[in-house]
Image (cartoon, rainbow, N blue to C red):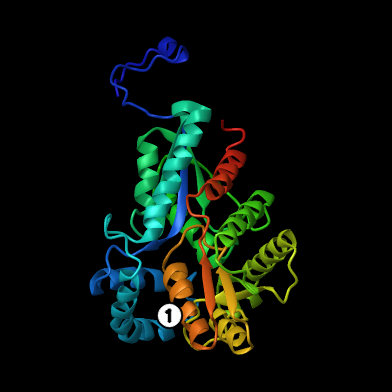
């Protein structure tokens, strides 16, 4: 910078002629979701699984015990099997997983909505905790666009250290390396937000009306976590139960017809119960012939909903005596889904817009 500085010019806001360009004054919104592999082959799946299962927020087993299991067993056998699962739901046109397709669409819709409110003052982007686009990269992209205030929106209705917290960890690690950090807000969990509950129930009712049968039971399935996490103080189980209760009250169904469960467990440790696959099997064996499953904890359809619920659990139900099965889609980028995301963004941007 020029050694001779005119103080009068500085007082009037006039920069020296050789002052570097500074882009500031805009607001960024960054949608955060879990992630997806870059391909269904062995090596893309292995990279994704290694990043995911190396996260201490996800796997809290001591490293001396976990690293041999992860590197010698899981990363040797699991990539091929999970790759085949992903291949059944892969968006071949875009060559990407559905979670990436849907999250992009959510960001694009939100950008259009906020542009109508604030013009070009707001920039919306999206990132994945694991895989691409990387959180660090997209935060920098927002900074390059002049965003000196950023709202992080973890797309997890129910808070868990293994989802919401690790997404924020990743963003904060990027901030730790910056000399000039943006001001950052994080949207809170929205498990009991009336707009969210209404959107989930409204979407379900429309999907149920399209079915050629009326379910005897609706099963509300949430992603599971080890029971130990609950005992350590993670509020996730409590958030899930409250979401389920509010949904059931809005539906007006008794508990025996509107049930909840937890899916996607692996390993030998006890996870939150009841387990989804065991519940589906028990319902079929108990004489239930018509079943619908919904997964309100997922903001977008992904492997755990499209392959595990609509695939594996459909097969379990039919194999054990069930006759009619329906998986009700996530909110995704539907009008109901976007109503929730717009509501969260507008609420958390108050004072900035």
Q: Give the image quarter of residue 272.
A: bottom right
Q: Quadrant of the N terminus?
A: top left
Determine whether, in the image, residue 229 is placed left or right of residue 60. Answer: right
**Which residue is more in the foreground, 111 or 56?**
111
Which residue does the numbered mark 1 point to in the structure image? Answer: 63
Residue drawn at 30 percent across, 16 percent down: 17
- Disc 1 packing (10 Å; few <14; some 14–19; many ≥20): few
Q: Residue at x 34, y 53 (%)?
A: 133
Nearer to the camera, 341 or 178? 341
Vertical arrangement, residue 241 with respect to residue 115, above or below:
below
Q: Quadrant of the C terminus?
A: top right
Residue found at the far front of this picture: 212
- Residue drawn at (40%, 45%), measured in percent from left and top? 139
Q: Percent position (x, y) of residue 345?
A: 56, 42
Label 1 secondary element: helix
Give the vertical position of 261 relative to 23 (above or below).
Answer: below
Give the number of callouts.
Answer: 1
Position of residue 123 measured from the top left corner of the image (x, y, whole percent): 43, 36
Is residue 25 at least partly visible in the picture?
A: no
80 or 283, nearer to the observer: 283
């Amino acid at each position: 910078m020029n050694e001779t500085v005119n103080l009068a010019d500085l007082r009037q806001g006039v920069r020296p002629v050789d002052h570097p360009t500074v882009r500031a004054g805009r607001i960024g919104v960054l949608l955060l979701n879990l992630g997806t592999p870059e391909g269904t082959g062995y090596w893309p799946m292995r990279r994704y699984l290694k990043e995911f299962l190396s996260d201490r927020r996800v796997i809290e087993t001591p490293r001396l015990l976990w690293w041999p299991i992860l590197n010698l067993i899981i990363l040797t056998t699991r990539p091929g099997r999970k790759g085949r699962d992903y291949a059944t739901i892969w968006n071949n046109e875009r060559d990407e997983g559905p979670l990436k397709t849907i999250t992009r669409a959510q960001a694009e819709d939100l950008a259009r909505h906020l542009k109508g409110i604030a013009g070009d003052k707001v920039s919306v982007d999206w990132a994945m905790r694991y895989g691409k686009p990387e959180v660090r990269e997209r935060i920098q992209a927002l900074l390059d666009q002049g965003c000196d205030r950023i709202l992080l929106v973890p797309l997890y209705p129910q808070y868990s250290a293994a989802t919401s917290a690790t997404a924020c960890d990743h963003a904060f690690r990027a901030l730790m390396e910056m000399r000039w950090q943006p001001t950052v807000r994080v949207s809170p969990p929205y498990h009991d937000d009336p707009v969210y509950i209404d959107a989930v129930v409204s979407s379900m009712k429309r999907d149920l009306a399209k079915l050629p049968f009326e379910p005897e039971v609706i099963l509300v399935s949430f992603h599971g976590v080890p029971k130990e996490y609950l005992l350590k103080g993670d509020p996730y189980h409590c958030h899930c139960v409250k979401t389920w209760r509010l949904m059931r009250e809005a539906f007006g169904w008794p508990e025996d017809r509107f049930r909840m469960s937890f899916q996607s467990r692996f390993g030998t440790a006890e996870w939150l119960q009841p387990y989804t696959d065991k519940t589906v099997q028990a319902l079929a064996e108990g004489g239930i012939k018509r079943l619908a499953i919904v997964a309100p904890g997922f903001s977008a359809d992904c492997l755990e909903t499209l392959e595990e619920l609509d695939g594996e659990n459909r097969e379990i139900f039919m194999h054990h005596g069930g006759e009619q099965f329906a998986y009700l889609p996530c909110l995704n980028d539907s009008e109901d889904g976007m109503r929730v995301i717009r509501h969260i963004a507008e609420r958390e941007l108050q004072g900035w817009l």
